[in-house]
Image (spheres, rainbow, N blue to C red):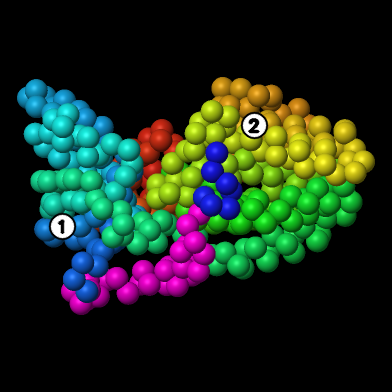
Amino acid sequence: MAQLGNLFPDDLKAQLPAGKAKRGANGPSARAAAAPGAHIFVKDLVAGQEVDDVFLVQDASLRLAKNGSKYIQATFGDRTGNIPVRQWDANDVVFQAYQGRGYAKVRGRVETYQARLQMVVFQIQPADETTLDPADFVPVSKRPLDEMEKELDALLETFTDPDYKRLLKALFADPQVRAKFIKSPAANMLHHAWVGGLLEHVLSACKTADNIAKDRPFLNRDLLLAGVILHDIGKIEELSAEPGFPYTDTGRLCGHIVLGALLVDRTAVALKDFPPKKRDILLHLILSHHGTREFGSPVTPCTAEAVALHHLECLDAKVQGIQSVIEADQESGNTSTWTEFTRMVDGRIYKDSNP
């Protein structure tokens, strides 16, 4: 397994607020003035545009048309968004260039189909990764990473339970764990799928959890917030920092729920006289946060805090996921009041709910 500190390339450490700020300068006038060879971002593509550039292949499938010919349905992306892709009259040899979620050098044209943009590919081949800037293809949180790190540290100081507080501080005193936790995505798609996404998800869910605990003193506030902070910590080992945030071998073999529980358990055992009952209750929150065995939880929630954690982290993930789907749909040029089909809601999302 790769060392935790090596999973994120060094050139991402300083890039991100500045990289995010550059997006506003990538409009049509900026595109016309771009240096030769500069990457044209997905958000700047327009209908009728001829394309000869590199994109990240995010998914692809070889399909059979009604007339018996084969075509490729795919999605290309970079740090600014995604665009659906079609290549007609394809075959298995051509499809090889789409496999592996890697970089592809593409020649094609942007068209409008059903009120949204798509790219029709004429030629494709694997791209030379040594000539690319990874920062062009890795989406990043809109919140500065250092700002969120300070917010996390301030949150830890609000804990009054000495055991949960020292457990959390011991975890984040490990520089490798801290670095990964701050930069990790929360997923490789659907919600918070960007550098800093895990921490952004955690901090947002913690605000909701804190308010719920204030309204319901019956809940153990420190236990609930510790569960929120740690419920997805296994994702620092489950997901890679490579563009597209693919799963690591460790992640596929073990899953983030088990990886997170093992990490927290190792830390608790290493602390002197950490109460075994508190360890078990906290581990229960991590192990049950997906709610049902059907969705990957080894156990189902059976404490008030575990039930609260499951619903509030799911709420935060789904609302952010829906926001991301709507934003991407709007950026693609879709003027319909409905998005395309999305797995997030197993259907289409109505975009005009705030008239």
Residue that appears at 76% across and 38% down: 266
Answer with left or right where residue 10 lies relative to residue 138. right
Residue that appears at 69% across and 44% down: 230
Answer with left or right where residue 164 lies relative to residue 247. right
Residue that appears at 26% across and 63% down: 39
- The amino acid type of the residue labelled 1 equals Asp
Answer with left or right where residue 41 lies relative to residue 238. left
Query: Of 205 and 9, which appears nearest the observer?
Result: 9
Q: What secondary structure is found at the residue carrying circle 2?
A: helix
Label located before the other in sequence (1 or 2): 1
Residue that appears at 90% across and 38% down: 275
User: Is 230 covered by the magenta stretch?
Assistant: no
Q: Which residues are magenta?
A: 8-34
Q: Position of residue 43 (x, y in %)?
A: 29, 61
Report the Cα–Cα distance between label 1 and label 2: 43 Å
Rendering quarter of residue 92: top left
- Mark 2 neighbour density, 10 Å: few (under 14) some (14–19) many (20 or more): some
User: Is 23 covered by the magenta stretch?
Assistant: yes
Q: What secondary structure is found at the residue carrying circle 1?
A: strand
- Mark 1 neighbour density, 10 Å: few (under 14) some (14–19) many (20 or more): some
Rendering quarter of residue 314: top right
**For the C terminus, which image quadrant?**
bottom left
Residue 132 visible within the image: yes
Residue 258 marker: 2
Q: Identify whether 31 is placed above or below 58.
A: below
Query: Of 242 and 159, which appears nearest the observer?
Result: 242
The residue where tag 1 is placed is 52
